[in-house]
Amino acid sequence: MTSIGVQVTTQVSSGPANPGTRSGRLHVAGLAARGPLGKAVMVESIAKFTAVFGDRTPATSNLFDTARMFFEEGGSELVVSRVFGPAPTAGALTLKDSADVNTVKVAAKDPGDYSAGFTVEVANSGSTFDVIIKRDGVTVTTYAGLVSPADLVQRAATNPYVTVTSLGSVTAAPGDNPKVLAATPLSAGTDDRDAATVADVIAALDAGSGAEGGAVGAPGYPATLIGSLLLDHAARTGKVALLAMPVGATKEEAIAAAADLAADGNGQYGGIFYPSLIVPDGGGTRTISPEGYVAAVRARAHEEEGFWRVPAGDVAVTRWVIGATEQIDTTANDMLADALVNGIVTTGQRVRLYGWQSLATDRENLGLLNARDVLNNLTVEVKDVLEPFVFDTNDGKGQLRSYIDSAVTGVLDPIAKDGGFFARTNTAGDVLDPGYSVSVDTSLNPITAQAENKVVVGIGVRLSPTAQLIQVEIIKVPLAGTV
């Protein structure tokens, strides 16, 4: 059929238009209604979070609320690790054959009591049989025309909801096929949440990956409880830890927590943020720990400028959050900053993060968290560009070292041109050095080093400072004076 004119079709995207930057990711751990054990999953929307980890419940509110806040405030990529106690179990149902012998086990994919929402039905038992699996009354999988338990196991090998195992019935075929069964629920598993500890939270984070160079948080676990462990995780995995106080904590308690953690050897890898935040909740409001908001404005700043950008000030004005549990003004914020606590300030109707202090003892070099952000993300990017050179021939002419030099410079030069590194200039404005250096020469790679089958690369960077304080002096002059 001939068509003339303009034809337009539309579709709904399943993810954000802009996937965000890798450095802007937040890795978060907490209790969830469902979800995998021992691995992290990246989600790009609250809808996808809910599909994988379930909806909000009183027990899972910390994780769900943080996820929603992250997306509502402009975050794009959330890496989620589900927390379990030491003895989680998956719900299951055992199917019996024509001789009432156990023949097939159908188990939920992941631990938790959500499994009781699944039912299994067996129809047309005999030489062939059908298996129908439903979740909350809705059919999610149908296997028709099955000829044996082994056939069911093979067909279900990639099922996203359940794991099917043959129990090796000795009944002669086809009598070993599952007999007719009305829709029957799986047993309720458990995530053993009541026995979960901060060590289990860190174990969940350690089992995941995909957020190197990003931020990490454990909402619901205050800095006084998990601070040192989360700082250690951040140091080991190249992240910055976002720590917070319990809802209702005072400024003095936040200051005391910062004083304790400032003595931690990994203090440069994290910061404390105060107070908690208020968000809309239908016709009312809800109070939430601030990690999701802090991570989101960090992601926004990195996307707008780069991972060297401090995500505080006007760039951090809230979009969804409507208030804070305590009205921190600039005077109170200065007191918090002196104590290495990052205040979320309320000025009029505006709420915004107004600090980016780390807990480092080296205040000159690592006092702001963006210093660690830069080092973490340079580590990730340099590793990425140099990986293809591993096992290349290190020739005597220095070609490999030249390629490596060019690859690393390709990472650093765009950052310098965007102002991330502080260039030195002479009085004429000529650049003396761009704020970075790369060395792969023979001084670092003598024959003895090359004989060890390695190439040594030296990188130096000078991070551009941040205008944390702008001092203005206004002078009134007499009418006859010169302005």
Image: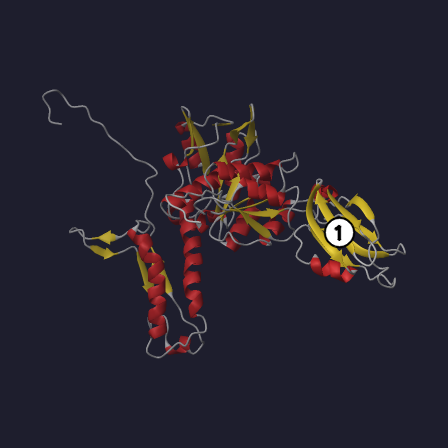
Point 44% across, 57% down: residue? 380
The answer to whether residue 89 shows anywhere in this view is no
Nearer the observer, 390 or 122 = 122
Nearer the observer, 89 or 478 = 89
The answer to whether residue 396 shows anywhere in this view is yes
Q: Is residue 171 left or right of residue 26?
A: right
The residue that disc 1 covers is 131
Q: Is residue 124 left or right of residue 33?
A: right
Point 79% across, 50% down: residue? 122
Q: How is the image coloured?
A: secondary structure
Category of crowding for the residue at label 1, using alpha-carbon neighbours closer than 10 angstroms: few (below 14), some (14–19), many (at least 20)? many
Q: Is residue 469 left or right of residue 254?
A: left
| Res. 227 image quadrant | top right
Give above or below for 377 relative to 469.
Answer: below
| Res. 287 image quadrant | top right
Point 32% across, 51% down: residue? 421
Name the quarter where the C terminus is drawn: top left
Nearer the observer, 7 or 212 = 7
Farthest residue toward the left? Answer: 480
| Res. 112 image quadrant | top right
Farthest residue toward the top? Answer: 479
Q: Position of residue 63 (x, y in %)?
A: 59, 40
Q: Position of residue 481 (x, y in %)?
A: 11, 24
Q: Is residue 159 left or right of residue 315?
A: right
| SS class, disc 1 | strand
Q: Position of residue 348 (x, y in %)?
A: 40, 23
